[in-house]
Image (cartoon, rainbow, N blue to C red):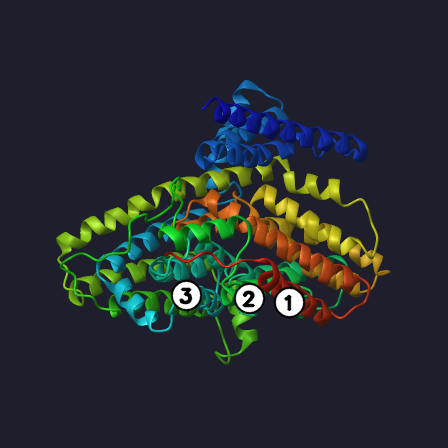
Amino acid sequence: MLNNLMNSKLKYVIGFLIFFGISLVLKWRAEQVGDAEILVWYSIIPPLLAVTLAILTTRLLPSLSIAVGVGIVLSWYQQGAIPIGFLTEVVWFVRAVSIGNEGVDLFNFWVVLFVCLIMATISVVVASGGIGGVVVWLSQFAKGPRSAQFITGLMGIVIFIGDYSNAMLVGPTMRPLTDHHRVSREKLAFLVDSTSAPIAGLAFVSTWIGYEVGLFEDIAKTIGLERDGYSMFFDALSFRFYCILTIIFVIVNAISGRDYGAMHKAERRARATGNVAAPDAKALGHTSSFTSLPNAVTQPFSAVLPLLTLFGLLLAGFWIDGEGTGFILSLTAWRDALSKADNVKILACAAGSAFIVSIVCARWLSELRFSDIAPVVWSGVKGSLTPLSILLLAWGLKASCDRLMTGQFLATMLSDIVSPLWFPVLVFITASVTSFATGTSWGTMAILIPTAIPVAFSLDNGSYGLTTIICLGAVLDGAIFGDHCSPLSDTTILSSIASSCDPLHHVRTQLPYSLTVAVIALACGYLPAALGFSSTIGIVGGTGLIILLFFGVARKPKLAT
């Protein structure tokens, strides 16, 4: 016991030494770069403190709460530390995570409503036996852990419309099947997370495309480039090495049935003991097994109809709200519609409709009484309270980073080494660090595209050349990679909710895989591409390394005896 106590103290000492060391280095760099009137070194403290505390304590809620509190104090200090000013800062933060400070922005409200409704819907379709019926149908295709993982990854690729809808559709649907085949919750969360943002970021038609194209349109005007944003998106598509290789990584991982590092330990535990979650896991969302109520009539349509309603209304809502015109199968028409549609509001409305359909199906297809359904709905709403608390605190931390200009500070600190060969790599790393620290991929894109792309354009001698195009892909992919790894990211939290996985366990097991893909993307993708090699060579070479890794180094988990 004494050794455990000493080890715990040593862990805290090392953790905080690293925290203070990074802070001092960034303070020194800030003094070297200057510009102290605009950017301050302590802007990095809130996200760095959140990550440090989360790792040391393995408790996300207190870690985020402390970091947000420190962010408010630092923001107050930056504004002059006037006594009445502290209340002003608190009000600013409350507005930032609720209705926004520039007009009324209900984005966060619609996300909260979406999570509540989707969790209640999941509860109903589980209790009504709908999920059980779907699992029985899918079981004919999934004969073991490998095929269960492959089907999960394939579903994530097929449902490409958006990262939120992807995670909340794939995770709950596949969770009973992966549990049955003793696939760990950590692996399920990885499959869900790795086929959400990477797929949505690559898809020609998704909730992301309008945002990405809009940023490209703005930067094209800034640098005087006569090229539309959609064309720039396609130009950069072949240089999206991280996202492309992540999808390949997921497929090869599932086919091989092999793992390494923390994920291998999780898979070995699940296969050998049947414990799909670690004993110390603090899962978000529904932690109970997927069992229907005893008096429910098992009926697949009790799950299929609500899910079809959700997905169908998402597509219809995007088209109608985005004023879609022309041929409905036209990619250009969908691009225009998605760029105009209020995506998150449509997600909430579609979830509300799916919730109503799930109750109707539970009552008349599964023959449950309303007195049976009401407690199930309440259970789903209660299951959303903890993850929503974490999500609200993550938004509070993002607001702190916005207030203190953390993203701009990191971009300035990491972007003063300029070389056409190394600049795409530097852009990718800068985007990754910024996104990891702030927990937002979109915010990172908004910061770095206006700052990094003009530099790349100048390195191309004022022309739309190779360095500029590679950097377009590097910003988007670096932002997704950092967000993918960050315990502060809303997509990380939502993937954990959907998979009923402890978010810190999810991050700990996913991080080695994400880092592996990022290193391969840099070594086989961005560096060779900057030297003039075809992006196809980089993708093929990266795929070869992934195959060698899984079939040469990774191991299969031991099966139960």
Residue type indicated by callout 1? Thr
Is there CB contact under 8 Å for labels 3 and 1?
no
Q: Is residue 97 left or right of residue 525?
A: left
Tell which of 96 and 268 is nearer to you: 268
Q: Which residue is mark 2?
A: 252
Q: In the figure, 195 relative to 48: above or below?
A: below
Is there CB contact under 8 Å for labels 1 and 2?
yes
Residue farthest toward the top in the current orientation of the protein:
83
Question: How many other residues sit within 10 Å of disc 1, few (<14), some (14-19) or many (≥20)?
Answer: many
**Of helix, strand and loop, which one carries label 1?**
helix
Who's the residue at 29% across and 44% down the image?
Answer: 382
Say whether residue 218 is visible: no
Q: CA distance from mark 1 to mark 2?
A: 9 Å
For marks 3 and 1 on the same chain, the one whose residue lies earlier in the sequence: 3
Who's the residue at 60% across and 35% down the image?
Answer: 48
Q: CA distance from mark 3 to mark 1?
A: 22 Å
Residue type indicated by callout 2? Val
Per the rendering, the mark at residue 543 is 1
Q: Which residue is mark 3?
A: 148
Say whether residue 23 is visible: yes
Q: Position of residue 243 (x, y in %)?
A: 60, 61
Q: Is residue 295 left or right of residue 271?
A: left
Tell which of 170 and 219 is nearer to you: 170
Q: Position of residue 295 (x, y in %)?
A: 13, 59
Q: CA distance from mark 2 to mark 3?
A: 13 Å
Q: In the figure, 9 relative to 409: above or below?
A: above
Q: Position of residue 482 (x, y in %)?
A: 60, 49
Who's the residue at 48% across and 27% down the image?
Answer: 4
Residue farthest toward the right in the current orientation of the protein:
461
**Of helix, strand and loop, which one carries label 3?**
helix
Residue type indicated by callout 3? Ala
